[in-house]
Image (cartoon, rainbow, N blue to C red):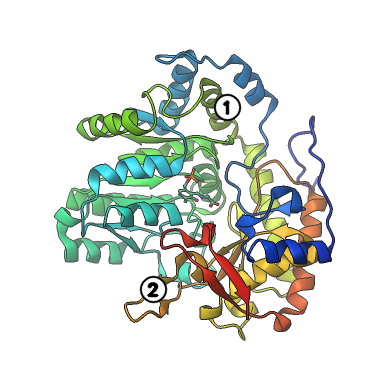
Amino acid sequence: FQTIIEPFRIKSVEPLRFTTVDEREQLLGRAGYNLFHLRAEDVLIDLLTDSGTGAMSTEQWAGMMRGDESYAGSRSYLRFLEVVQELTGFEHILPTHQGRAAERILFGEVVRPGHVVPNNTHFDTTRANIEHFAGLPADLVIPEGMRPSDEHPFKGNVDVERLEQSLREHGRERVPLVMVTVTNNSGGGQPVSLENLRAVRRVCDRWGVPLFLDACRFAENAWFIKQREPGQSHRSPRDIAREMFRLADGATFSAKKDGLANIGGFLAMNDEALAERCRNNLILTEGFPSYGGLAGYDLEAIAQGLREVTEEDYLRYRVRGVEYLWEKLDAAGIPLVRPAGGHAVYVDAKALLPHVPPEQYPAQSLAVELYRAGGVRSVEIGSVMFGRPRPDGTEEPAPMELVRLAIPRRVYTQSHIDYVAEVAVAVADRARELRGYRFTEAPRVLRHFSARFEPL
Ligand code: F0G
């Protein structure tokens, strides 16, 4: 049969609250047109993020009950450790309360002022953490990765030529590590091929620079490799994922994505001396190394989630579900990042709203309208998130103006997604009427979370 069904049934449900356009209009005003300021119960379909928003399985909930809350050496930690080591092969595993804590600890130990950290594309928290330690994040994705309408099976690939050039220019001393984000979230949830990871590995070996994965969505990346990379279709996603990790020297991980958990993460590496320094930092800021800012039951949920996430039935449904929404929007002529990403559909707001210049935040305008029209919450990934002030007070816009519709894992059914498509198509049909925004308040760091706006 052709229909790819949800590979689960639903045991517990959470009611949705319906609001009217007039109510949402008022709520937007109060929120300063920043969707992060809305109350979740005022949102009908919440596609703000796929992070920590997934539904857990019965086995994960059972694991929560089994959680061993001992301060040191708990059984839950040992179970977590066993799964993470089997999957990643890394020697040292430090649990953290989420991905950005792993980033802060890692970069705090290795990044010094003026250091350059290359990546395909840094996500907001890795970028901000590197900048926090006065380092310079460098985005070196292949050129196709920056052009929404270009087709490429591995649009998250690193431009290996530019990586080599960057190492030649800055030297080994100024590049403490190279990162690769799988999948490439800021660039449309696009995968990185094994071939590309191997090529990056060779460059890192030649220069003696360690390679770290930002592995939040490693399982979705492995699925794309299985589907698209020549010679990989016979392998299991888990086997591919294991190879991805073994091409690296370490990883930062947010268990809120492909950990299928609501909280958690880890920092992993093979370097003993670095691990020792990171562990001390962990004890100082997160917790003892056998829980790292998490409860024992969280470690159980992650351990079980990391088993389930590489199951083929799950990944087929997951990636197909995102593609289903993508196809509906594409059929309606909405400009999208092509092809569909692993966890989200990204609308190209620059192309949909050509009359709103980047200085007036077209992706913000579109995101606000999706909420006003249908109660659908998305997130801006454009100049609100990544614009940077120039010395003369004007602003350097982001390379792309995207609205991300991120699909939480195992949460929404096909009719929810049909509704989202209907709302998006209706909004796109009157895109010409949408106007830009300006900031009324903007903090210096990670401003998209707390800024306020007014319509122009
Ligand atoms: N790296 C990537 C690629 C991410 O997408 C995120 C989080 C992080 C690191 C940080 O992990 O949230 O556990 O601290 N991304 C979420 C998102 C917030 O909406 O894409 P965290």
Is residue 62 visible in this depiction of the protein?
yes
Instruction: Name the residue beneath numbered marker 1.
Output: 301
Location of residue 273 in the rendering, given as x and y in whole percent from the top left corner = 20, 32
Q: How many numbered marks have been drawn onto this rendered protein structure?
A: 2
Q: Is residue 74 above or below residue 94?
A: above
Q: Secondary structure at mark 2?
A: strand
Judge from the rendering whether residue 32 lies leftward or rightward of residue 130; answer left or right.
Answer: right
Location of residue 132 in the rendering, given as x and y in whole percent from the top left corner = 32, 54
Q: In the picture, residue 169 is in which quadrant?
A: bottom left
Q: Quadrant of the N terminus?
A: top right
Whether residues under marks 2 and 1 lie with C-beta atoms below 8 angstroms apart, the answer is no
Q: Is residue 181 above or below residue 262?
A: below
Which disc is residue 76 wearing?
Answer: none
Q: Secondary structure at mark 1?
A: helix
Location of residue 439 in the rendering, given as x and y in whole percent from the top left corner = 54, 72
Q: Amino acid at mark 2?
A: Pro
Q: Quadrant of the C terminus?
A: bottom right
State which tag comes first along the sequence, 2 or 1: 1
Q: Can you tell me whether the CB of the residue at mark 1 lies under 8 Å from the nearest atom of ligand 1?
A: no
Q: For the point 44% across and 21% down, which residue is it? A: 82
Judge from the rendering whether residue 90 lies leftward or rightward of residue 237; answer left or right.
Answer: left
Q: Is residue 224 above or below residue 444?
A: above
Q: Can you tell me whether the CB of the residue at mark 2 lies under 8 Å from the nearest atom of ligand 1?
A: no
Q: For the point 41% across and 76% down, which residue is it? A: 396
Q: CA distance from mark 2 to mark 1?
A: 41 Å
**Can you tell which of label 2 and label 1 is closer to the viewer?**
2
Which disc is residue 389 wearing?
Answer: 2
Q: Nearer the viewer, residue 288 or 55?
A: 288
Is residue 328 visible in this depiction of the protein?
no
Neighbour tally class for label 2: few under 14, some 14-19, many 20 plus, Cα within 10 Å: few
